[in-house]
Amino acid sequence: MRTKSTKQNKINVVTLGCSKNIYDSEVLMGQLKANGKNVVHEDEHDDGNIVVINTCGFIGKAKEESVDTILHYAQRKEAGEVDKVFVTGCLSERYKPDLEKEIPNVDQYFGTHDLPNLLKVLEADYKHELLGERLTTTPKHYAYLKIAEGCDRPCSFCAIPLMRGKHKSTPIEEIIIEAEKLAAKGIKEVMLIAQDLTYYGLDIYKKRALAQLLEALVKVEGLEWIRLHYAFPTGFPMDVLEVMKRQPKVCNYLDIPLQHINTELLKSMKRGTTHEKTTALIKKFREVVPNMAIRTTLIVGYPGETEERFQELKDWVEEMRFERLGAFEYSHEENTSAYALEDDVPADVKFRRVNEIMEVQSQISWELNQQKVGKTFKCIFDRKDGEYFYGRTEFDSPDVDNDVLVSAIDHYIKIGEFINIEIFEAGDFDLYGKPV
């Protein structure tokens, strides 16, 4: 690729959005490295003369961040600080014609399934033999493992099927090859990700095969923790709970976005469930795996969410006492079926409701954390920051859940190691402990 710079090309990959985008960037970087390219991820000096931005197009705020990032690098290109700017990912898939018109200074836009074409313009060949090869950007001891792409769910508020297409499971043998390569590099924990984990296998095996996949993954030497992210409540495969209960490598942890609890809103959201069914499902989880940590996410301010319906949600959060919970304001997304509804909850009300839910959750989290004081947990340590080492129990995923803090003044801990930690103090979202 001919550019204005005389120095050797350096490709800086910038990733926005979720763990699935991180995974896609890692695959792109693995391909570029295999082609002998100088590639970095979010280079701290920001001196790559070629920039690839992997965008998110999920909701309003994420789209805004993606557009701001594209504009930032387009301006840097205008100023002669970078030579080429390429944009890929969800926003580009969803709004390519608009982006080409509004920000023409970008060299080329690519969709979510355009990896071979993106590599071509970066003068690299797509290497099919690189199955499972990635340049991981996470700490050396954990990685995301994508087991499927796309989604067949019809959720009214969600634009993901527009950007990612239909659900497509990756065969078990290919996932195992990738897991073995990660373990050989020293990865001890994998987070299984997909738009919907629980749909896994229906397209290729004609049955839900997540439990079967887990049984194969626990045999991978070197892996110690396997964590489940993004399950769907309708049609949840209960055999997964039996594997979780039986296999110590499968963390007693489940990330299952439930979105709401009011039956009328769930119907409008096309979630295929009701208040009663959702409550029964959570109770069943806790019955089968009593010490499971359940993480969920909720949407507030969805069209038709009256104060009464919001109060129902709030009361339910208090009743369920989720170990982990995040709440988000509804984003009115064009081309989704909910877009035909009136976005009738004012922005300030959405904001207030998010804060009210998180206040309730903060109290629940504090109370649950107090029960951990005096107990010992196996923890993995991700980083040292200031005067503390930051670790996690099996009930916590990186970046979104609680941290276990150990004084770096009094103790030395090797990053990426598993250590037993006794908890002596607990806050809303942090635990303080010492090595046993």
Image (cartoon, rainbow, N blue to C red):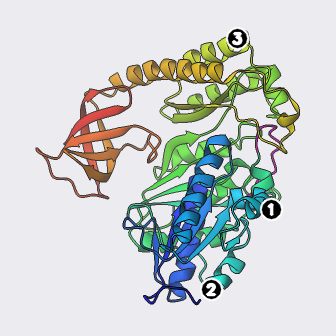
Report, in whole angstroms, how far the alpha carbon at label 3 lies from the one at label 1. 40 Å
Q: Quadrant of the C terminus?
A: top left
Quarter of the image holding residue 25?
bottom right
Q: Is residue 163 left or right of residue 86?
A: right
Residue 337 vertical placement versus 347 (above, below): below
Residue 394 vertical placement versus 127 (above, below): above
Name the amino acid type tagged 3: Glu
Q: Is residue 141 found inside the magenta-colored segment of the image?
A: no
Residue 263 vertical placement versus 17 (above, below): above
Q: Label 1 near label 3: C-beta < 8 Å?
A: no
Q: Earlier in the sequence, mark 2 or mark 1?
A: 1
Residue under label 2: 129
Residue at horizontal 58 percent and vertical 41 percent from the top? 255
Quarter of the image holding residue 277?
top right
Q: Secondary structure at mark 2?
A: loop
Name the amino acid type tagged 2: Glu
Name the amino acid type tagged 1: Pro
Provide the major secondary structure of the magenta segment: loop
Task: Say the numbered circle drawn on residue 97.
Answer: 1
Residue extending furthest left? 410
Q: Residues within 10 Å of mark 2 (few under 14, many from 20)?
A: few
Stretch in magenta: 149-158
Q: Quadrant of the N terminus?
A: bottom right
Q: Is residue 156 found inside the magenta-colored segment of the image?
A: yes
Residue under label 3: 307
Q: Earlier in the sequence, mark 2 or mark 3?
A: 2
Label total for image: 3
Q: Which residue occupies the foreground of this view, 75 or 216? A: 75
Q: Which residue occupies the foreground of this view, 329 or 238? A: 329
Q: Secondary structure at mark 3?
A: helix
Residue at horizontal 70 percent and vertical 41 percent from the top? 232
